[in-house]
Image (cartoon, rainbow, N blue to C red):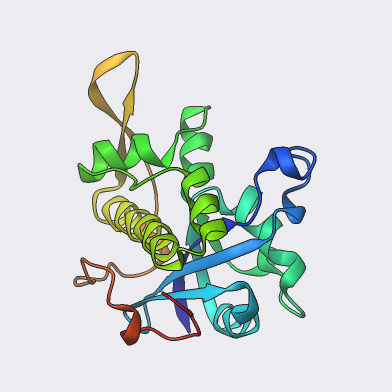
Amino acid sequence: MDQIVLDLETQHEFSEVGGREYPHLLKVSLVGVYSYARAAFLAFEEKDIPELEKLLSETDLLIGFNTKHFDYAVLQPYLKSLDLKKIPACDIMEDVANVLGHRLSLESIAQATLGTGKSGHGLDAIRYFREGNMEALKKYCLDDVRITRDIFEYGKQNGKILYTSKYRAESLSAPVSWKKLGAVRESVPEAVPAAKSEQGNYSLF
């Protein structure tokens, strides 16, 4: 079995599909994952989702940020036989919100916990897709996958994550209990590998 870190990008923004009540209409442009079993970053275009479904069917932990409320809703309509909600999951945003009583952005956690931030905005990803700049789209998505994975690893090792607040100059912390989700991997790649070393059909990636 495998543990998977997942993030996806969409073809549309909410204003184009009638609002936030219709995430299932956004359509996938790219799904990026990190596979612990393969020690590899992988990317899947919309047409490659059957291959992704096979990978996810062999997964015993799905890790992400706001995956349960966003990524699942966008991705589930593509899946033939897999119910994403039945896969054991660690949704970092949900776990932190349950502790703090409010949501945090991936950026605020990444900046405080890792000392680095996101490489762009979700609207950039839509623009990359529409321009056919699939290499930039892949880099953006897999950068978010790497950040999510590294936050998860930090939380497992330290029992907390850090975050920034506009009301406080210093970083704050929130406890997490992720050690029970599996042994900490001592060595994971620091950079996204070149496209030729990855699996799937990525066209210009």
Residue most extreme to the front: 131
Relative placement, left or right, of 114 versus 109 is left
Is residue 127 or residue 119 the one in the foreground?
127
The residue lying furthest to the top in this view is 167
Nearer to me, 201 or 172? 201
From the top left corner, tell me how far across and down residue 113 is, in percent: 25, 42
**From this viewpoint, is residue 8 visible?**
no
Q: Is residue 40 left or right of residue 30?
A: left
Answer with the quarter of the image where residue 82 lies. bottom right
Say if residue 13 shows up in the picture: yes
Q: In the rendering, at what x and y percent does residue 80 appear? A: 77, 79
Across and down, in percent, residue 49 comes to 63, 77
Q: Residue at x 34, y 39 (%)?
A: 109
Split into 4 quadrants, where in the image is the C terminus? bottom left
Q: Residue at x 52, y 27 (%)?
A: 102
Horizontal arrangement in the rendering, residue 101 relative to residue 14 (left or right) = left
Q: Residue at x 37, y 39 (%)?
A: 107
State the count of labels.
0
Is residue 84 placed above or below 92 in the rendered structure?
Answer: below
Q: Residue 87 placed where, x, y %?
A: 61, 69
| Residue occupying the point 54% across, 59% down | 129
